[in-house]
Image (cartoon, rainbow, N blue to C red):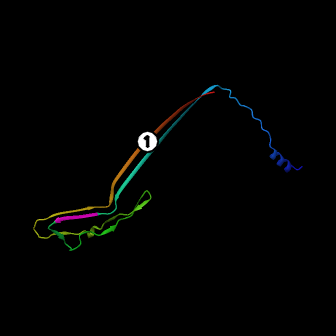
Amino acid sequence: MSLNKLLLLFLLLGVKANANVVTPSFSSGTLNSRQEVKSVVVENIVSVDYTSGYQYTVSGTGIEPINGDMISPKATLLNAQTVDGVTFQWTGVDASTKPDWKLTTPGGSFNFSESLLAPSLSNVTNINRTTTTESIVESVSVFLQ
């Protein structure tokens, strides 16, 4: 008989398996477990705010621009800057085009206010914090036979 036929016959007929009873050799016991976890998170948050353009404001009474209808200076792009690999460019004021003002009635009453807020860094917020978390888990298992 060939080996393949013997194997097939062996598989079809099956083999008797014997099992023995396993009896543990202990009567009682305990299992103690302790797990400790500690994590430390250090954060440094930096928020930087910029005004990227300008704000030119004029208010008053009894005044008017000398050159007629021009009431605001012309905008101009300022030199580009690079900080920490980031290049940016501000929009500023061409000071040579700032309007001049005159009294509507020479010698009359007037009030006048002129302000210029140039592009700039307006606010830096630094938040540094460390968060530490600790946990301990202890367990005891008692078993008897």
The answer to whether residue 75 is magenta is no
Image height of 67 relative to 25, above or below: below
Horizontal and vertical percent for residue 19?
A: 75, 34
Horizontal and vertical percent for residue 56?
A: 26, 64
Of 125 and 84, which appears nearest the observer? 125
Image height of 142 relative to 12, above or below: above
Of 7 and 65, which appears nearest the observer? 7
- Determine whether the residue tagged by mark 1 lies in a helix, strand or loop: strand
Q: Neighbour class for label 1 at 10 Å: few (<14), some, many (≥20)?
A: few
Q: Which residue is mark 1?
A: 131
For badge 1, the amino acid type reads Thr
Magenta-drawn segment: 55-60
- Please tell me in which quadrant of the rendered image residue 90 appears: bottom left
Q: Is residue 96 left or right of residue 141?
A: left
Horizontal and vertical percent for residue 8?
A: 82, 49
Of 122 and 26, which appears nearest the observer? 26
Image height of 12 relative to 109, above or below: above
Q: Is residue 80 left or right of residue 111?
A: right
